[in-house]
Image (cartoon, helix red, strand yellow):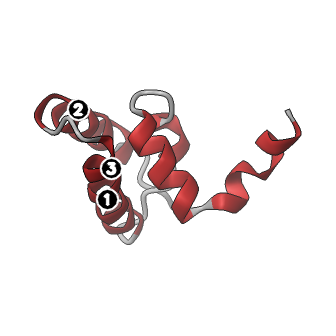
Amino acid sequence: MGWASGTWVMQDIIVTLMSEIKCPDKRQRIYKGIIKALQGNDWDTQTECLDVDPAFDAALKELHPDWFEDEQDL
């Protein structure tokens, strides 16, 4: 069973990182570690955090490119 409330945790993290770390590349590296940690604790609603910070989107796409294969057809 998944951990859907991880979305709310991650959204709070995203807002905080966006205000504190201006460099998107640094945020992306940080997001990758956080995503892995939350997934290791059964977080399964990662895509609900898309479109808040492009750096998060890039991190998630880097970790799970197969989730975004259909976007190439657009």
Name the residue nearer the viewer: 30 or 37.
30
The image quarter containing residue 11 is top left
Point out the residue furthest to the left here.
20
Instruction: Name the residue that disc number 1 marks.
Output: 29
Instruction: Give the Cα distance between marks 3 and 1.
Output: 6 Å
- In the image, what residue type sits under mark 2? Met
Q: Real-space Cα distance between discs 1 and 2?
A: 13 Å
Q: Are marks 3 and 1 in contact (CB under 8 Å)?
A: yes
What amino acid does circle 3 point to? Asp
- State which tag comes first along the sequence, 1 or 2: 2
Q: Position of residue 46 (x, y in %)?
A: 49, 47
Whichever of labels 3 and 2 marks the residue nearer the N terminus, that label is: 2
Residue 8 horizontal/vertical position (percent) = 31, 36
Residue type at tag 1: Arg
Label 2: few (<14), some (14–19) or many (≥20) C-alpha neighbours in 10 Å: some
| Quadrant location of the C terminus in the rendered image | top right
Circle number at residue 18? 2
Q: What residue do we see at 41% from left, 53% from top? A: 3
Q: Secondary structure at mark 1?
A: helix
**Which residue carries the number 3 mark?**
25
Q: Which type of secondary structure does the marked residue at label 2 adopt?
A: helix
